[in-house]
Amino acid sequence: MDRRKFINLSGLGITSFSIPNFIQSTIPTSSIQPIVASTWDAGLRANVAAWDILKNGGKSLDAVEQGVMVTENELNCCVGLGANPDRDGIVTLDASIMDHEFNCGSVAFLERIKHPISVARKVMEKSPHVFLVGAGAQAFALANGFSLESADLSDQAKKNYEAWLKTSNYQPIINVEKHQSATYNDSAFDAPKKLTDGQWNHDTIGMIAMDQFGNLSGSCTTSGAGFKMRGRVGDSPIIGAGLYVDNEVGAVVATGQGEDVIRVAGASAVVEWMRQGKSPEAACKLVVEKINRIKKEKAKDIQVCFVAINKKGNVGAYALQKGFNFSVYNNEGNKLNDAAYLI
Ligand code: SD4
């Protein structure tokens, strides 16, 4: 900490012994092991980019941005511009990012921009606001050097949309993964081919990470629910719902039915359970149980999943239904894990 900052804090009666974690964050500590966790199996590929930053002493904020950009770049995938459109045939994207000092930025209902996560970061760093949507978010992106991409659907999204138009029935599919827990090493990383068969089951990647400074950050980027109503926004760009980071406690990201994550302020609720001493998995479970209680018999028709990391670097996850998996990269490698579940 520099001298001026120290004096300012001393003036407030805060000594180095009482400086909260979210301020005391610039000194690398050898006991801290960096770690990154992300939703679904697409997270394995995203984790590789994030880990590259973390293992070289980089910041968790850079890791979670660069990590999910990998998924946004996978044009024949379910996140980003290659994803399923809304019911009017237009892809609209939502994203959010948050760092260890409660800085956060979000965009929603954003069209024709390749990396919504980076626009969210720009909102956080270069605007006086936290959340920009629609045409305003797009204008902000263009003013900050992003390019306007084609409005054409990807080949796969076009096929999916044409098939959907036959019934035009909005029925979100419960997200399920076919891939089993496994460890991946980067040299044998044939992931894009190997892991694509379940790819259209979900539309989101969320990522949380701790760096060697012990600082937590998180990101979330999505095309939202396929064939949603025009203008629909889910949980992913809503700070406290799809994503929350409190550097004194932990970081949490959500995936699944956004409407039901929003109504319980999901990610923030998980953080608060961790603050009460619950493990990451137990904290995720308590919020999933609450959603289950609220939804009653309708719970069987939805999927909701949380991934959490606490200040000790422990990661846990929990899902409403079977079939959610999450990817974790630390010093021991990049591993896909099946989450525990309620139903
Ligand atoms: C949403 N939570 O927009 C997102 C969707 C999702 O895997 O997570 N799909 O509601």
Image (cartoon, rainbow, N blue to C red):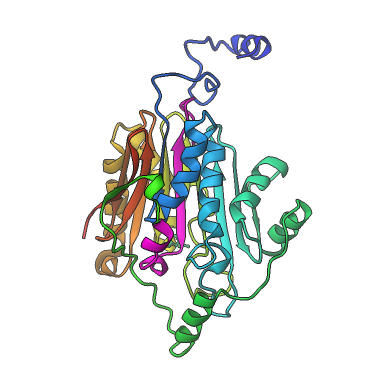
Residue at screen point 63% across, 60% down: 114
- Relative placement, left or right, of 6 versus 280 is right
Check the image and report above or below for 275 versus 237: above
Farthest-out residue, left: 343
Q: Of 2 and 10, which appears nearest the observer?
A: 2
Residue at screen point 51% across, 43% down: 64
| 215 is within the stretch colored magenta | yes
**How many marks overall?**
0
**What percent of the width, then of the height, locates residue 96?**
55, 50
Q: Quadrant of residue 10?
A: top right
Q: Of 160 and 182, which appears nearest the observer?
A: 182
Q: Of 255 and 10, which appears nearest the observer?
A: 255
Considering the image in quadrants, where does the N terminus appear?
top right
Check the image and report above or below for 247 versus 83: above
Q: Quadrant of residue 330?
A: top left
**What percent of the width, then of the height, locates residue 194?**
36, 61
Q: Is residue 266 visible?
A: no
Q: Quadrant of residue 197?
A: bottom left
Farthest-out residue, right: 143
| 331 is within the stretch colored magenta | no
Farthest-out residue, bottom: 166
Check the image and report above or below for 159 versus 53: below
**What percent of the width, then of the height, locates residue 191?**
40, 56
Residue at screen point 52% across, 36% down: 53
Q: Ligand 1 falls in which quarter? A: bottom left
Considering the image in quadrants, where does the C terminus appear?
bottom left
**What percent of the width, then of the height, locates residue 339?**
27, 51
Q: Is residue 116 visible?
A: yes
First to last magenta residue range: 191-216
- Relative placement, left or right, of 292 versus 111 is left
